Image (tube, grey):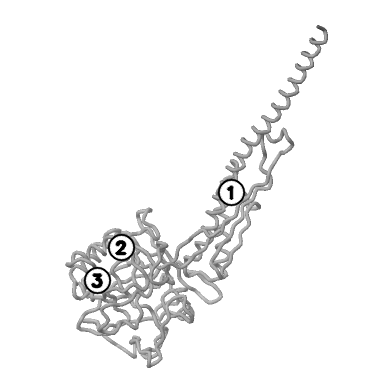
Amino acid sequence: MQETHGLIRNRRGATLVIVAISLAAMLSMLALAIDLGMLYKTRAEAQRAADAAALAGASVFLELGIKASEKVDSANVRAYALAEANYMTGGLIDSSEVTVQVLPDSEKVRVWVRRAAVPTWFARVIGIDAVPVGAKAAAEATTAGTTKCVKPFLIPDFWEENSGQDNVVQNQIWDFPQNIPNQPSSCGTTWECWSYDKAAGDRYARYDEPNATGLGSTFRDARVAANSPNKYRDDYARPVMLYPSFPQYSPTPSNWFLWRIDCPGGNCVRDAMTGCTTTPISVGQEIAKEQPGEVRGPVQQGLEEWLAQDASARFVESERTDANGTYMTGTVVSDNPAYNGDANPRVFIAGLISPDFLAPGYDEVPLNNLGKFYLESIPPNQGSKAPVKVRFLGFVTGTGDEGPESGSLVKILKLVE
């Protein structure tokens, strides 16, 4: 009987040992569950911060008017600023926890976010007081081929004029159109008289091609406008006067054309100007070209209604000075803060066509590029013959869909790592 009682006491002692071991195991599992969940949450926060910072840094490659060296600096500033605006484990990320690498040749920005010691809770019981947590992301600006909400404008792209630059300035910037109804012409004295003539040495290459002359290129950076001490780097903010083309006159570089809307009647033209076409438009796509002079009434109504969508909008130029002299940048501002910058309804996307297709007889023309513009003004009391003043604002945001070819001014930002 005494031996049995001792055996029971021994079993009770063994049970206590088993409970103690089980409790330790349960605590370890609790530490694993709670602390691992917290660490995964922290890593997700680090990943979000790295993603946002990489995208912010790469966004600089969607802007013109900035030198390559400035883009590297600006990409660093944007990436660090975005990363430091984010939280990890309830605390703001510090600059010492961020590493940024800018690769301008590939227009890529890579960001690492790492916190060296994220404190644990229950894992301290098993001797783990802190764990390092980090994440990496990379984003790049890459060319695309397709976008939406393209206005029915076809604008001749810029070329190097070697056959009609007879005036004193000869700055490769269109001064005045030729063959415009009721307008004077002073070719060879006051104004440059352009006509695309390859045989005479005229040359064209769109933006981002070798030795480019098109809008957005550096071709005009060293040339100063005749009526101003200022220039526009990469053509950003450059004002351009466009005159509607008419059937009875030969096309000139300052003309603009319509692309034919897929519905009958002038109302379609007017509605396309004031609204947004949802049909995707692609670089390389064949577009039916027609002249605004053929539907001058609806065109004029469309322009006036378009300007009235934000009558307070204006373009404010800003001056910058560097070793190459003064140049201009700027932005669209409005009395309605929601309409500042690219959000303004007068900022639009237009098709650019090669000057090879300016000549009569080209009713179907391929879109050579797509660019962003600001509709600044139309002179009063000139009716349907009035010129349109626009400003070139650079890159278009693509949809990511594939088109016949990539557009050198059509870009998207995407995470690649």
The residue tagged 2 is 279
User: What residue is drawn where x is 39% and y is 88%?
Assistant: 202
**Which residue is painted at 82% across and 7% down in the image?**
2
Q: Residues within 10 Å of mark 1 (few under 14, many from 20)?
A: many
Give, as a three-letter code, the residue at label 2.
Thr
Q: Which residue is mark 3?
A: 260
Q: In the picture shown, does residue 320 fall above or below 134?
A: below
Three-letter amino acid code at disc 3?
Arg
Secondary structure beneath disc 3?
A: loop
x%, y% of residue 24? Answer: 71, 29
Q: Nearer the viewer, residue 40 or 49?
A: 40
The residue closer to the viewer here, 228 or 249, is 249
Q: Secondary structure at mark 1?
A: helix
Q: Quadrant of residue 255?
A: bottom left
Residue 355, placed above or below residue 76: below
Residue that mark 1 sits on? 46
